Image: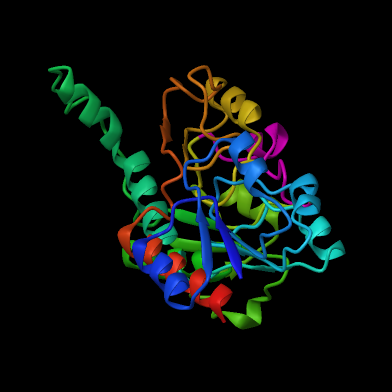
Amino acid sequence: MKVLISDPITDEGLSILKNAGLDIIYLPESSKPDLEDAVNEEVQAWIIRSGTKINDGMIKSAKNLQVIGRAGVGVDNIDISSATRNGIVVMNTPDVNTISAAEHTLGLMLTLSRNIHYGHSGLEKGEWNRHQLVGTELQNKSLGIVGLGKIGREVMDRCKAFNMNMLGYDPYIKQEMFREDEIKIVDLETLTSEADYITLHVPLNTQTRDLFNYNRLCSMKPSARIINVARGGIINEADLAKALKEGKISGAAIDVFTKEPIENDHPLVGIPGVVLSPHLGASTKEAKEGVSRAICEQVRD
């Protein structure tokens, strides 16, 4: 079997495939023209992370493609409809990134609350802004979790240690699945209007694209903050910039973007109260090793 790998994976993952006798084409830093040349009728398996976008044309070029392996959770960078029509199995590794994404969510929440980013940049400029950078505690604040899958639940469990009050929204979750003293399941409108912090843990699809547009952002508390470590496009970025500039909400921490990497003139760059990170939710040593190992084992088997 010939396996195309168009995003970086670990040496352990590569060894799993090599030891199984598979023929590997490894193009972790390939340009689009190089990738299009590599996608041909000889490729039977294709392993990617978030960097590669697989469209209908690529799938049609790989006439003998049997499986696409996504090292990670989201598959919105794969034309699933085309893969299905062509009888191609799409696999991912939904459990491996869970802890990494949950911990990054908490890191961003604490950064927003305590102005850590401003303190750091100020010190680098020789400024001692201790009295100007007054933060807020997480204790007794309401945390609204949109999406109560594995990552959302890990965030919930960790935020219990901060004594936060939990609100949850998930169309597939009922209150009976949780104790009310653990989390209160509410509709999205209630969560949006009552939460001091909102964190998003849903996939990007037709139902969730622009889920947080200008109107929904304006229904949040003026003191509220929003965190997105899920997928770019769930929050409308231009609407978020407008809401922040107008003081409709207090802050935002964004790890994922509609188009990555972002440009210097991105609407969220330079806005006070904003923390940006370059899609670091799954960027831990443990997560990278785990997703590489898991997807290579799936493709091998």
- The residue drawn where x is 47% and y is 41% is 29
- The residue drawn where x is 50% and y is 71% is 296
Residue 95 seen in the figure: no
Query: 267 and 183: which one is in front?
Result: 267
Q: Quadrant of residue 68?
A: bottom right
Q: Quadrant of residue 140?
A: bottom left
**Residue extending farthest right:** 85
Residue 74 is a magenta residue: no
Residue 126 seen in the figure: yes
Looking at the figure, which quarter contains the N terminus?
Answer: bottom right
Q: How is the image coloured?
A: rainbow
The answer to whether 217 is drawn above or below residue 289 in the figure is above
Query: 257 and 235: which one is in front?
Result: 257
Query: 49 and 45: which one is in front?
Result: 45
- The residue drawn where x is 44% and y is 63% is 155
- 183 relative position to 75: left or right: left
Image x and y of residue 301, in percent: 57, 82
Image x and y of residue 130, in percent: 16, 28
The answer to whether 5 is drawn above or below residue 234 in the figure is below
The answer to whether 52 is drawn above or below residue 284 in the figure is above
- The residue drawn where x is 69% and y is 49% is 54
The answer to whether 56 is drawn above or below residue 154 in the figure is above
- Dominant secondary structure of the residues highlighted in magenta in the image: loop
Image x and y of residue 123, in percent: 15, 24
Image x and y of residue 42, in percent: 68, 59
Which span is picked out in magenta? 207-222
Query: 187 and 201: which one is in front?
Result: 201
